Amino acid sequence: MHGLSAVFEKEFRDHCGSRRFMILFALICLAGLSAVYVAAQSIRSDLSSDSSTEFVFLKLFTSSSGVLPPFLAFISFLGPLVGLALGFDAINSEKNSGTLSRLLSQPLFRDSVINGKFLAGLATIALMLASIMLVISGLGLKLIGVPPSLDEMVRLIAFLLITIVYVAFWMAVSILLSVLFRQAATSALAGMALWIFFAFFMPMIAGIIANVVVPMNADPDTLTLLRHENVSQMASRISPTTLFQEATVTVLTPGIRTLGPVLVRDVIGMIPSPLSVTQSLLVVWPHMVGLVALTLICFAASYTKFLREEIRA
């Protein structure tokens, strides 16, 4: 596509040099370093009483001493803010300032504009998260003194890729809102409303849906409880936040063998061994496909709307 590289380079430089990027990077990096430092102190005390070092490095991202949430909770909470901040004014700000019509008057395809903006935001997200992961891993390695194994490194790479897709989904949502709404403040508020709905209200709505589909009496039997939990879990997975949390916890915790409710009779005779990387990825494969599909759907909607709308000086 003619002009795609020029738009990409310009947007990528703007993102990396903006105060918005610096503030978000510093916020997530500070939160991650604090969470890993607190987790490392707890891990070091556990290592002094237990000589086993299996999957110790992964505990830096999932464990917490109770003072601060784990790094996984921070990235689940702050990741959407990064995606929304990178795209809420991607299109409407240029419309309002009149630069979009001047840009499209150049020998530049219209789809190169929105594709370049999305790819530049995706590269910015990847750069930010990879840098934070390296800094946090370096601090954790210095504090606990146990290097990650090959299995742990693969799991951390998978965690990084899932996180990039998760943040890219929110960026695609913000770009879509930027195309739909003329004012940047309106698109920002709409994005924040969606984030709050999926993060805080969707679990409560999932419980209500489960109560309607599978009513619970005073003394429900095992089958009713199982059906109720399955319906609640499936309804909560409408939220991309739930998909991300389940996928990352499973990837970073090899001991998790399933994400659904399990009866006692199902675990009798089961060997309590951790899953391999391949098996863990197979467990969360539907979640990963769901996040990628949601991201592509949101971007495709914004792409179609942007190509069809009329842009005047």
Image: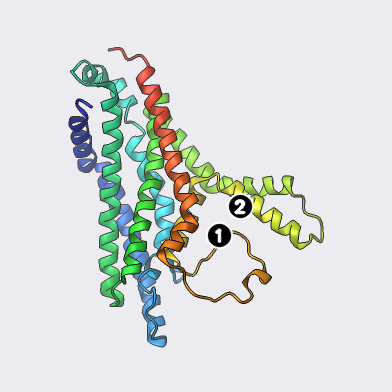
Residue 164 lies, in percent from the top left, at 35, 49
Q: Could you tell me which secondary element the residue under label 2 belongs to?
A: helix
Q: Is residue 182 visible?
A: no
Front residue (pair 136, 161): 161
Residue 281 to residue 266: above or below: above
Give amino acid for label 1: Leu
Query: The C terminus lies in which quarter of the figure?
Result: top left
* Residue at 66 percent of width and 50 percent of height: 231
Indicate which disc residue 216 carries. Answer: none
Q: Which residue has dot 2 on it?
A: 233
N-terminal label among 2 and 1: 2
In which image quadrant can residue 74 be found? bottom left
Say if mark 2 contacts mark 1, CB within 8 Å: yes
Disc sitting over residue 259 in the figure? 1
Q: Residue at x 59, y 59 (%)?
A: 260
Circle 2 residues within 10 Å: few <14, some 14–19, many ≥20: some
Q: Residue at x 46, y 63 (%)?
A: 279
| The N terminus, quarter of image | top left
Left or right of 144: which side holds 105? left
Is 310 in front, or is 294? 294
Q: Secondary structure at mark 1?
A: loop
Q: Position of residue 65 (x, y in %)?
A: 44, 72
Q: Quadrant of residue 157?
A: bottom left
Q: Residue at x 74, y 49 (%)?
A: 214
Query: Residue 64, image x and y in percent?
Result: 44, 69
Depth check: 122 or 70 in front?
122
Amino acid type, callout 2:
Gln
